[in-house]
Amino acid sequence: MHKLKTFLSNPEDFVGKRTGLLLALLVGFTSGLGIYTFYYAEGFSYMSSDPKVCANCHIMNLQYDSWQKSGHHHSAVCADCHLPHGFPGKYIAKAENGYHHSKGFTFQDFHEPIMIKKKNSEILQANCVRCHADLVAYMRPEAGGARMEVDCVHCHSSVGHGPRAGLGGGYKINRKGEIIP
Amino acid sequence: MMNIQQRKAEAALPFVRVVEVGEDTTDPAVWGRNWPTQYDLYNRTSLTTRTRFGGHGGSESMPPEKAEKYPWLTTIYQGYAFAIDYRERRGHAYMLEDQEKTLRQQVPQSGSCLHCHASVMPLYRDLGKDDVMAGLDATYKLSYKEVNEKLKKMGHGYPVSCVDCHDPNTMQLRVTRPGFIRGISELAASEEPVPHLPSVELWRKGSRKAPYDPNKDGTRNEMRSFVCGQCHVEYYCSGKMPLTFPWGDGLAVEKVEKYWNEKTFPDGEVFYDFKHKLTGAKILKAQHPEFEVWSQGVHSRAGVACADCHMPYVRSGATKISDHWVRSPLLNINRACQVCHSVPEQELQGRVDKIQDRNYELLQNAGKAVADLVAAIVKAREDGATDEQLKEGLELQRKAQWYLDFISSENSMGFHAPQESARILANAADIARQGQVSVLECRDRK
Amino acid sequence: MMNIQQRKAEAALPFVRVVEVGEDTTDPAVWGRNWPTQYDLYNRTSLTTRTRFGGHGGSESMPPEKAEKYPWLTTIYQGYAFAIDYRERRGHAYMLEDQEKTLRQQVPQSGSCLHCHASVMPLYRDLGKDDVMAGLDATYKLSYKEVNEKLKKMGHGYPVSCVDCHDPNTMQLRVTRPGFIRGISELAASEEPVPHLPSVELWRKGSRKAPYDPNKDGTRNEMRSFVCGQCHVEYYCSGKMPLTFPWGDGLAVEKVEKYWNEKTFPDGEVFYDFKHKLTGAKILKAQHPEFEVWSQGVHSRAGVACADCHMPYVRSGATKISDHWVRSPLLNINRACQVCHSVPEQELQGRVDKIQDRNYELLQNAGKAVADLVAAIVKAREDGATDEQLKEGLELQRKAQWYLDFISSENSMGFHAPQESARILANAADIARQGQVSVLECRDRK
Ligand SMILES: [Ca+2]
Ligand SMILES: [Ca+2]
């Protein structure tokens, strides 16, 4: 079990990166554990673009609630910002993220608060630029090419989920002082 | 692998009341039957923790004397009980024990001391015949020992307990301590701007008929700091007059100084805490003004409450609860800071280190300056200087020492308000050195 | 994932190059034909603006003398050209004119002065036969007048221009100034932690064969501060050695002080800027260390660049562009601050006011302390004190005045790094007052 856990948390240490990804898909989605998680957490709908899918994990409630109050509520859903645009990137990322999320959710061993990882923040950046290409055309290297290095979230960190500060974020509390999950 | 199922179930039911709790239920173990997780966490305040400037050694031993790190403390407190014994703080679990054990008790202490070290409300109701203000005011002339014994006989010998911060019926936050309730309503009645306390600004716009009442007027977010402000504040607590929170002119160090300078004892004498044994100056003693200093920082202006950092939410199964293990947030950076600052832990620690390093440097400098002033006065007296010649020097000692002590006794090593703490320490050192100059120039004075 | 070709297609360029611009195109009006909006905004730096501590009167008049508000400046600069004329700054449009007009020119100034007041690169290439470092080094022994005339004859008599910050082919940001390029590579070669400059930390982990080159190694975000760091920095610029940015030991005030203290002139004498006319102390002069002070603040650690606040994005038709009207962000709080801080404008102004008020108070206190020290030395000399007796006092004057000047000549009234600025001013006052004590105790010294 220990070995499996180490392997799950860092499959790239055991095999090459690419195979690691494939293996991750395998382990994450076809092992008994994976299937259970996948099924119970309504994993099949994970493949759709409905934001409720993401909020299906209570872990994502904070982001779901705050997104509903954000300026983008009417213009973009989770997938528009967090998944690569177009085939097949979208599905690779979904599978890879799906693996991380299921694992995190099952073992409860992820970093809290959840913090976006490098790869996902690159996807995010590309999506901002995709929708706002005209507006930010001036900010991009004239020569084209390289990734924009000034992240949009450097200034616009609140666009997706509102400002961060507050009572631990978007949690609701009733008059009795009880926290409503 | 029942994890997910379990968590879905947990999400539905935050707690069940298995026992009734009421205003006289001071024993936290009883509350713990309804809210076992909060109670478990609450109990951990007895555990050993360590940060560079915070934390404590748990039950292993009494915390170290502060004078080990800040030797000038012994000099500046000459003539006061704090020169006998003054230690780093410990967790909430120890508050009553540490108060009983401190060698400061060699000098008889006031019964009002218990205001902040025990679950004392039933006692106040008893002494004041249900008027808690009267109950508190009955204690200052009584001896600590007497009041402590009575408390224990009544069965309330516990450190700060659930009932001190929670309404037993609704579990809503509330403040209970008369000192705070009086202090904050005097602050509200003043004209001092308090941009970090929106409910006070709002109350001021109203009829002002009833005094500001934190339990009615305070916002939920403010209550998350007010409960701490019941104790983590500057005070007067001794035998000459009732326990006082000095907020009638504002919370900034100069405003509190003004309050004390304009205060007189019942016998008409101008207020002071003690007469310095070596110099004769009439000194003001500052105690742990966390609430006041936090009020000057950018966090309070941004609505960040004590509980946000010291009692951050933790996930317990599917629900989030407040971490009742009140302690240094640096032991817990991910929950205490990263909810708002999405930068790596190491970077946040780095920022705090910088702030605390700078504050530590200024603190030691200011401490040396005041100690130098004391030495200068002592020497001048030896050389025959008169009270008249030393008048300015003694006034400057009172002032400089007040500023120094305000930050030296504050417990965040500058973090709660970095620039303001630095400003106060700058003034402490500058004024102390001016005092030195004044004393040296004595000889030229008539 | 998106490939490069796709991106190129998307990045439909929002402008047309109607004229070619090159390394020798210093006239901003020419660039303005390609980028008219940026040019229009750039030109507005000549307009009148006002904030409590910033802004300027535009073309109406020369800005006020700084000594009007800070009378002690006249005392501390005795013996140096800054005592003759030292004014508040104006907008970029005036930089060349103000340098020509300052009465400091009564004392012959060095040709290197133009490094930061004109579009000087073609001249350096000319003087250095395409080696800009050699070009700069050729100017320090020449007189200001001579170099200024040559610059104008070559047709480059413009204040900071587009070509100084932009690569004319790609419009990418780049630094051009030799002083900065040398300074930052010396900083990189040191071991001083620079958590706010990730590319320097990265370079240090590499082979270090080639010196750190901001134009190659710097991140895009860093460049948004580096372009300003070409000028808004502490420097030496006079006739004894080439223009120097003193960063070889780090950017903190103590590190820069160490650098100067260990520096010797070509003739072997220990470095100083001027000899104080009244006291004889060998004094260090600090100039506008915005880059250095910003480096100590929490904004720089959070990756917030000069351009974020001083050149925030503005909507211009369908695109947004950088506001080339470089000015006080307080004139523009909604764009300069509110993208990151979603709180009301008035609240942000309130936070800045608090920071600046505290800094102003400490600045005036420290100024008085240093002036008092100067007065004490003068008096002791009158009373017959010897150089030997005054040795410590004079050293403390050099030190205290350096700290005072570092913040007094910094232009954000404490905002760029509130706690650090307060710390520095605290030390200035403390040290100056210690100097006073030392001088008074002279009489007891041998
Ligand atoms: Ca006190
Ligand atoms: Ca200089």
Image (cartoon, coloured by chain):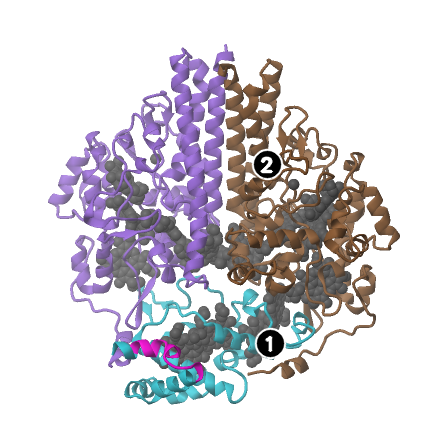
Chain colours: A cyan, B purple, C brown
Per the image, label 1 sits on a secondary structure element best described as: helix
* The residue stretch that appears in magenta: A5-18
Which subunit holds the residue at mark 1? A
Residue type at mark 2: give it.
Answer: Trp
Q: Is residue A59 left or right of residue C332?
A: left
C433 displayed left or right of B274: right
Quarter of the picture containing the N terminus of chain C is bottom right
Distance in Å between CA atoms under marks 2 and 1: 48 Å
Residue to which mark 1 is pinned: A129
User: Across the whole image, how many numbered discs are drawn on residues?
Assistant: 2
Residue bearing the label numbered 2 = C402
Q: Is C446 within the magenta?
A: no
| Dots 2 and 1 on the same chain | no
Residue A47: which numbered mark, if any? none
Left or right of C246? Residue B348 is: left
Tell me whether the residue at label 2 lies in contact with that at label 1, contact meaning CB atoms closer than 8 angstroms. no
What kind of secondary structure does the magenta stretch mostly adopt?
A: helix
Q: Is residue A7 magenta?
A: yes
Q: Secondary structure at mark 2?
A: helix
Q: Is residue C264 positioned above or below C59 on the image?
A: above
x and y, in percent, of residue B93 in the image: 22, 50
In the rendered image, which quarter is residue C271 located in? top right
B105 and A127: which is toward the camera: A127
**Closer to the eye: label 2 or 1:** 2
Query: Which subunit holds the residue at mark 2?
Result: C
Q: Measuring 56% from the left and 61% from the top, which residue is drawn there?
A: C199
Q: Which picture quadrant has residue B274?
A: top left
**At label 1, which amino acid type do we have?**
Val
Residue C133 horizontal/vertical position (percent) = 72, 53
